[in-house]
Amino acid sequence: MTLAPAPRRDLYALLALLVLVKGWMIAAISDVFLYGEELEKGTAAKAMLDGLAIDHHQLAYHYYEGGGFVISHLKALAFLVVGENLLAHKLLGLFTCALVMSYGWRLLAHHCGRREALTFGLLFIFGPRAAQKLSLLSLGIHFEAMFFGVLMLDQCLRLMKSHLGEDPTRALLRLGIVSGLGLYFSYQMAVFVGGVGLALLIMRPGIVFSRSGSFGLLGLVLGALPMIWMGALVGGELFDVHGRSLVTDKSRLDLLGTFLNSVYAERGGFGLLTRIVYPLAGIAALAFALLRGGLVPRFLAAIALLWVVAWIGSGFILPEHNYAFDWMRMMPLWVVVLLVGSIMAARMGRGGTVVVGSLCVLGLWNTAGILGEARPWSPFQNLGLLQRVKGYHYLGYVPKILPHLAGERAEQLRRLAEFDEPHPELLHADLAAMGLTDLDQDFAADLQLVREIGGEQHMGWVRGLGRRLVRATKGDVARALAAADGMGQELGDGLAEAAGRVGSDWKVSPESLSAEVTAHMASPRASAYLLGTGARFVRSFVVGPGTFSYYLNLDAAREWIAQQPPATREHLTRGLDEEWARWLLD
């Protein structure tokens, strides 16, 4: 169906609003960056561009994440266009966000009307706080998979509403292809595949069992070819989701109780209000659709309920929801409920307008809150910074790819050392930090291994041995520094710096790091240790997810250093500056 000019102009207006709002979030360096998996999939993209001597499929972040592998390819293209930086991730996230909204709008514009489609677009842009953040994370899972989810729903509705005399062959083939691709992208799409299949079986059995029905199966196989290809290469690992089972023997009531407790307990004010209003609005929309809706809202509501049943019955309920990212798996449900709610609100007349207006105001308040936590008044300076900071992170990617590689550990690490990294010491330290963690050997063997692999550059690898050194001293940093002090000047300083880069606990806060500085500032190797601590501050907070107020904020980092004992500041500053330089592309 060709859309009329007016609805198409509506879409353009919504896209302009989306780009304005989401683009401002990006340019303000809002809390839409702080998840390491995004950069780790960027590291897979860099591996593709750098031509590592590794089979292509082995570069995948996880074999079971088809969408994650696809997004790594798209990140590689984005890197070629704008550079291997943080901005590339956010531009790709903005693109996929616009794609999901556009096809949700298209579904409602075709099957319902202009009012419903406009409502969907506005509530999509000004949605719950978590949804606004998650829609800009470029991960290739759950949220992005709803591009295929919406296409499946649209194709199924077209088939259910088609006339008896129409040939359904092409439509079934398209539905099959989209379903297969969706399954490859995210296993959550199995709920949608099952839902549309069941709907067609009930509503249009003649189509399903006709000769054209075989084209639907053919399309499913064609769409699933990437998954079949990956399965042929890796076997059962394709379905290994962190070793978890599809079912669980844990009590569903206990899991749901923990979930509800994490959502509502010990919360108040505006945050609690939003966690009450949005679920109530969604439940009301689903109930209204099932009781009084027509074909389209009832079908969509049934898909939403099927998803809820699958979520409760699966072994993948995430009981704790304390952070925005914890809601990632529920993004498919949010999109479908939003489709249903947009239809029912449009049919309520003036009352629906009041509800939509109230939700938009609430969403706009969420947007203002996200921007208010960031730096919204220096967008061009921030964008320049996003162009300079590296969009990849070896530390998180190494433990994901190592199990994919054959051979001895030394051989594996040599292959990974072939990244085209302008600061080799950054790469080497991360390879040592994560490449030796699972080896059952003593620290002397660790040193021997990095000397063998690193050769003349082995000191760069030594800086990544902090975790192994502290582990060898039972978590006692003071003992680790004493051990380093007995290993000669160069090696001792390198190991003391390595200890400073990790400390005694990976769950670090600015306060706990200050306590560590005070505790170890009198060590004979304090200067080297403090260099590592300054680097640790960068990795944990300035480019890491530790505390948002420090993210990409060197001024705030220097303020923290200014609060430390005077004797430590010079070394902390040097460590911070040197590590920050390693994270810049220029």
Image (spheres, helix red, strand yellow):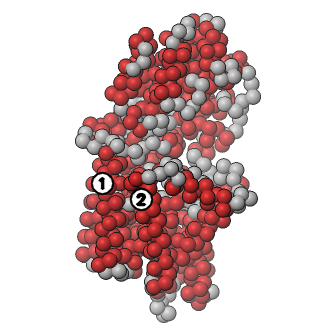
Would residue 42 be found to the left or right of residue 477 on screen?
Answer: left
Which quadrant of the figure has residue 504? top right
Type of amino acid under label 1: Val
Point 45% across, 85% down: residue: 292
Note whether 260 is above or below 84 in the view shown.
below
Q: Quadrant of the C terminus?
A: top left
Residue 414, how many percent across, how many down?
61, 29
Residue 138, how many percent across, how many down?
45, 50
Q: Nearer the viewer, mark 2 or mark 1?
A: 2
**Residue indicated by mark 1:** 21
Point 58% across, 20% down: residue: 499
Structural crowding at the residue carrying mark 1, measured as other residues with C-alpha within 10 Å and reported as few (<14), some (14–19) or many (≥20): some
Mark 2 or mark 1: name the one nearer the start of the chain. 1
Counting every numbered tag in the picture gives: 2
On the question of residue 575 being in view, the answer is yes
Structural crowding at the residue carrying mark 2, measured as other residues with C-alpha within 10 Å and reported as few (<14), some (14–19) or many (≥20): some
Note whether 133 is above or below 349 in the view shown.
above
Point 42% across, 18% down: residue: 564
Given residues 344 and 91, the one toward you in this image is: 344
Point 53% across, 20% down: residue: 516
Q: Secondary structure at mark 2?
A: helix
Would residue 413 be found to the left or right of residue 114 on screen?
Answer: right
Note whether 87 is above or below 584 in the view shown.
below
Type of amino acid under label 2: Thr
Would residue 29 be found to the left or right of residue 535 on screen?
Answer: left
Given residues 543 and 281, the one toward you in this image is: 281
**Residue indicated by mark 2:** 274
